Image (tube, grey):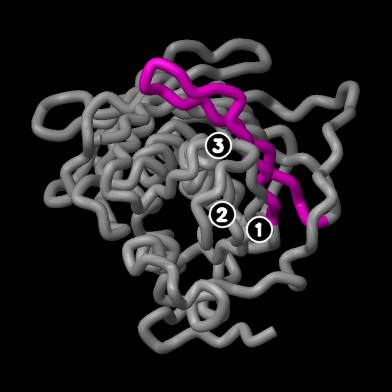
Amino acid sequence: MNEDRSESEDPRAAIAELLALLDLEQIEENLYRGQSGSVGWRRVYGGQVLAQALVAGIRSVVAERFVHSLHGYFILPGDLKIPIVYEVENLRDGGSFSTRRVKAIQHGRVIFVMVASFHKNEAGLDHAAAMPDVPGPHELENARELFSGKMVDLLQSMQQFWKRFLPIEFRPVDISRYLDRSRREAAQQIWFKAVDKLPDAAEVHAGILAYASDFALLETALAPHGKLLSDPDVRLASLDHALWLHRPVRVDEWLLYSLDSPSTSGARGFCRGQIFKEDGTLVASTAQEGLMRIG
């Protein structure tokens, strides 16, 4: 499999830019400032705000406790032109758990709010769902091969959507839904990983996992309706996002994102996901509801 990337898609440069986005500037106790990177949209990518808010929360908690869950609400679109300020509020430091509320602020207004819970490492019962039986990442074509081969006739807007996420390589298991408008099951699987080696810090991997977890989640709800994210009559916007981290994870190793959408109604779509290591270990789960307007 040809893994080469063009000079304009240098993996080290792409990862360096993403790490810089997550390396927040501390401007006061429990107050941080983050910059924004464009993925080609007029507003800030929701996964970036989610990841930066998580990093701010992690930095306010002792190292012996690590995030196990977060729940966030997207309130206003983010402005790409100015920094985002993250205000961390300490809600609780108990015997085993810590809880933080993080507000993302621009133009004096809250654009995103998140509550995250942190837990010290403890032994306990252990079971997990099984990974779907799908082809492995090395059996699939990368984006460059897809867009010069089977997907060469795909709408340019959709090609650009996939190519904008340079720090993360995504390999969809089934590309057929991008090639025809057949109505199909509200489910998909996508392999992903960072395009280059990452530092070992758990904060980095949790942040980038949060960043990637917003990708393609809401889009899954379009499949039963024969619609694509790039369709001019489709309007999608994330309303909330939840992420549970079950086990340690490295995002510079292949992960399978298994997505489904149990319901769409009332101009809202509900989607959920499970994230597995290549050996089948379940490492994280997600859920999201979003605005879905057609026309």
Q: Are marks 2 and 1 in contact (CB under 8 Å)?
A: yes
- Which of discs 1 and 3 lies nearer the camera? The answer is 3
**Residue 166 among magenta residues:** no
Q: Are marks 1 and 3 in contact (CB under 8 Å)?
A: no
Q: Position of residue 188 (x, y in %)?
A: 64, 46
Within 10 angstroms of label 1, few (less than 14), some, or many (20 or more) residues? few
Residue at 55% x, 70% y: name it: 195
Q: Position of residue 275 (x, y in %)?
A: 68, 43
> Would you name the residue on which mark 3 appears?
224
In the image, is residue 243 above or below residue 155?
above
Quadrant location, the C terminus:
top left
Residue at 66% x, 58% y: name it: 174
Q: Position of residue 73 (x, y in %)?
A: 37, 23
Residue stretch in magenta: 255-278
Question: In terms of secondary structure, what is the magenta stretch mainly?
Answer: strand
Rounded to the nearest angstrom, the CA distance separating label 1 from label 3 is 15 Å
In the image, is residue 8 above or below residue 158?
below
> Would you name the residue on which mark 1 appears?
174
Q: Secondary structure at mark 3?
A: helix
